[in-house]
Image: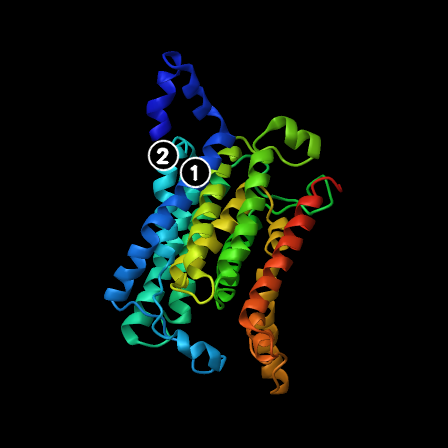
Amino acid sequence: MFIEFLIPLVKYFTPLNVFNYLTFRSIYAALTTLLICFLFGGKIIEALKRLKVGQSIRSDGPASHLVKTGTPTMGGIFIIGAVVISMLFWGDLKSKMIWLALISLLAFGVIGFADDFLKVRRHNSAGLPAWGKLAGQFVAALAIVLYLYFSGGEEVTKLYIPFLKNPVIDLGYWWILFGVLLIMGESNAVNFSDGLDGLLAGLLIFVFITLAILTYISGRVDYSEYLGIPYIPGAGELTVLCLAIAGALVGFLWFNTHPAEVFCGDTGSLSLGGVVAVISLIIKKEILILIIGGVFVLEIASVIIQVIGYKLTKKRVFKMAPLHHHFELSGWAESKVVVRFWILAGLFAIVALSTLKIQ
């Protein structure tokens, strides 16, 4: 919106041409969200405290977490709010991809907000029933995937595998089911990873910076052709959104680092997980996103293994699932678990980016 007023003025004042550059707008979108979080984060936390929007802690979790009871939650609100405001300034609102990603962010944010609201209202860790949360995610994911399917080109249903230049299969109609499952799975995997101070924000910073690189090169004919990846017209505009979210996460991490002053809540985790999957679908990195978000895959896999293992053997495979709690109960300090998981996230990001040239 902001740039639409400035661009026509370029002919009168040529330095304004800088707003035409995607890299410039992406950097300042990140700085804008960062600044918004720094300036208003403390005020929002105080407001959440006055409203008594406190986190309820699982009684079966690590005992060290009980002191966190009452810490303000729903911190995802100021992440989402900062991103939306930043995109009004720096995003090209004529881009359908931007609107789709923002709608995805808001749709899953609403589902997460409903879950957080019920937890706060009931003063326990039980929010929306599992079927209700999954139903909401399914409806939102289906609407997004159907839009992509009917508005996309012939590339939309093709599946690309890392290390291979050409698509391995055209899923056809089955891509709709695949896309829905990917969005729901990624959203829940990110949600499961939100359990320690600073853990989720740090992991997602790596993911969105990696996605910013991928959206930028996918939206350029020369770079995509050189690297042998699908060229997605207009995908470069998503770079602005990715870095805006990364900036907001850095700002949020300022308040969320141990000991946390605010938690992300499902409002943030479900929305951010959902938009990660949507962006991967748009730029045809559906499989690569499993490497980029490798820590999230490990987290949700640990939950699945724990449930199946217990049902089959009546014994726990891990001391507690998700995986980060297993290491806590194994004697690792919370900050050590967080930093080591961040290191893993960085390694996964490097491996994912390396696949662009190894194909």
Q: In which quarter of the image is residue 269?
A: bottom left
Left or right of 250 on screen, residue 109: left
Residue 256 vertical placement versus 333 (above, below): above
Frontmost residue, 151 versus 329:
329
* Disc 2 crowd, CA 10 A, few/some/many (<14, 14-19, 20+): some
Taking depth in this image into account, of 136 and 55 the one nearest to the observer is: 55
Q: Which of these two is toward me, 6 or 236?
A: 6
Tell me residue 344's x, y (percent): 64, 59
Tell me if residue 114 comes above or below residue 219 in the rendering.
below
Residue visible at 58% across and 62% down in the picture:
339
Residue 141 in picture, x, y percent from top left: 45, 53
**Quadrant, the N terminus:** top left
Look at 53% across and 56% down and name the residue there. 202
> Crowding near pointer 1: few (<14 within 10 Å), some, many (20+)?
many
Amino acid on which the number 2 mark rests in the picture: Phe
Labels 2 and 1 touching (C-beta < 8 A): yes
Image coloring type: rainbow
* Residue 9: quadrant of the picture: top left
Q: Quadrant location of residue 42?
A: bottom left
Q: Residue at x 35, y 61 (%)?
A: 74
Mark 2 or mark 1: name the one nearer the start of the chain: 1
Amino acid at the residue labelled 1: Ala
- Say which mark, if any, is on residue 29: 1
Camera-side residue of 72 and 326: 72
Is 90 left or right of 296, judged from the image as shown? left
Asked if one can make out residue 234 in the rendered structure from this viewpoint, the answer is no
Task: Provide the residue designation for mark 2.
Answer: 89
